[in-house]
Image (spheres, helix red, strand yellow):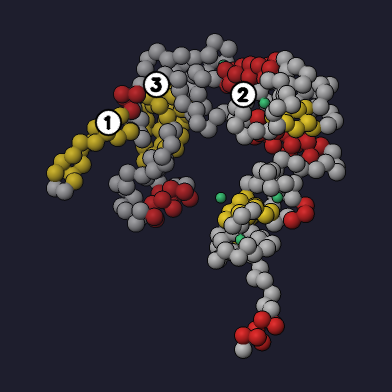
């Protein structure tokens, strides 16, 4: 069940209410979204069922959720009997089966997400599963349709064509071939991709797709080398670029997700909740502030000066 589900058709007007607030001594009207349903109201819940609200009641503070207590404390512990964020509960009766009752469902008005939606007396439900649209059947159908479309697209890629955009890879284009088993379509030949950053593919760019493919391809068999995406930090010096992996760099033309100017100070990244300082440049280009190692002091030059 999707976390961001909401019914395809609900009563947008019914959930809004106009409240009057006093600001700078003047009454101001403001639209608010109701957090508490009315008794007798027909509502959709996150379970994708339609319910009639038969009672709304207060929840004892002793039974509040820890989250509610935290929010209440953060707001300065206002009177728990009147605090708008206090928990309430509802009693529900199924709109389709009167014998199906829910004696107690908690409502957390402080939460920003919606827990229920007002329905009009007519609302669309799925013929197959009986749940309110969009129902899980639709999602399963959507997924299956998308998978089938992608399969057909891949199956239609001609030999010698790019596996991201489907266009022929000619000598003029920058391209890359991944030897061995095709990971997108078993049985097809080695996958080839355009590598230019500007070529648009079905999703993103050919280059982006090629880098994604490379990540899987490297893992699929030991000893495979990365060619498109380097894990080093690429520093730009005054006249040239330099990668901190030195000899092991796949080439300064490769994609370096980490890159900076050689004068960038304290360049760190977060790894598993810890700040790890990135490697510094390997050489110093002489620019003021270059973070590469300073050239060793020439002892003779010093003695001559003295
Ligand atoms: Zn359904
Ligand atoms: Zn392409
Ligand atoms: Zn430098
Ligand atoms: Zn590199
Ligand atoms: Zn830069």
- Ligand 3, seen in the image, is in the quarter at bottom right
Element type where label 3 sits in the image: loop
The quarter in which the C terminus is drawn is bottom right
The vertical placement of 142 against 30, above or below, is above
Query: Hey, which quadrant is residue 89 in on the image?
Result: top left
Q: Which of the 4 image quadrants contains residue 44?
A: top left
* Residue 17, numbered label: 1
109 above or below 39? below
The answer to whether residue 98 is visible is no
Image point (82%, 23%), residue name: 189
**Disc 3 target residue:** 10
- Residue at image position (79%, 40%) is 218
Number of marks in the rendered image: 3
* Coordinates of residue 164 in the picture (x, y in percent): 68, 26
Front-most of residues 18 and 285: 285
Q: Which mark is residue 202?
A: 2
Alpha-carbon span between mark 2 and mark 1: 44 Å
């Amino acid at each position: 069940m999707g976390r961001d589900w909401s019914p395809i058709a609900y009563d947008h007007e019914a959930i809004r209410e106009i409240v009057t607030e006093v600001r700078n001594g003047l009454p101001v009207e403001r639209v608010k979204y109701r957090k508490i349903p009315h008794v007798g109201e027909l509502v959709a819940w996150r379970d994708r069922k339609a319910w009639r609200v038969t009672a709304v009641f207060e929840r004892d503070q002793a039974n509040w959720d820890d989250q509610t207590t935290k929010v209440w404390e953060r707001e300065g512990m206002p009177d728990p009997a009147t605090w708008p964020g206090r928990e309430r509960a509802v009693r529900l009766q199924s709109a389709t089966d009167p014998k199906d009752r829910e004696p107690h469902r908690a409502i957390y008005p402080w939460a920003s997400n919606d827990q229920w939606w007002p329905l009009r007396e007519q609302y669309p439900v799925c013929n197959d599963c009986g749940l309110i649209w969009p129902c899980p059947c639709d999602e399963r159908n959507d997924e299956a349709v998308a998978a089938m479309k992608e399969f057909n697209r891949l199956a239609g890629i001609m030999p010698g064509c790019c596996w991201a955009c489907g266009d022929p890879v000619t000598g003029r284009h920058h391209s890359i071939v991944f030897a061995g088993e095709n990971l997108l379509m078993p049985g097809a030949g080695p996958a080839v991709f355009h590598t230019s950053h500007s070529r648009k593919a079905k999703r993103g760019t050919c280059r982006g797709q090629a880098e994604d493919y490379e990540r899987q391809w490297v893992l699929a068999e030991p000893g495979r080398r990365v060619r498109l995406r380097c894990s080093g930090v690429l520093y730009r010096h005054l006249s040239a670029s330099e990668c901190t992996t030195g000899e092991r760099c796949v080439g300064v033309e490769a994609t370096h997700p980490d890159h900076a100017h050689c004068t960038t100070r304290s360049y760190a990244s977060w790894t598993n909740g810890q700040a790890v300082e990135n490697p510094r440049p390997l050489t110093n280009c002489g620019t003021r502030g270059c973070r590469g190692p300073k050239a060793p002091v020439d002892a003779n030059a010093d003695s001559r000066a003295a």
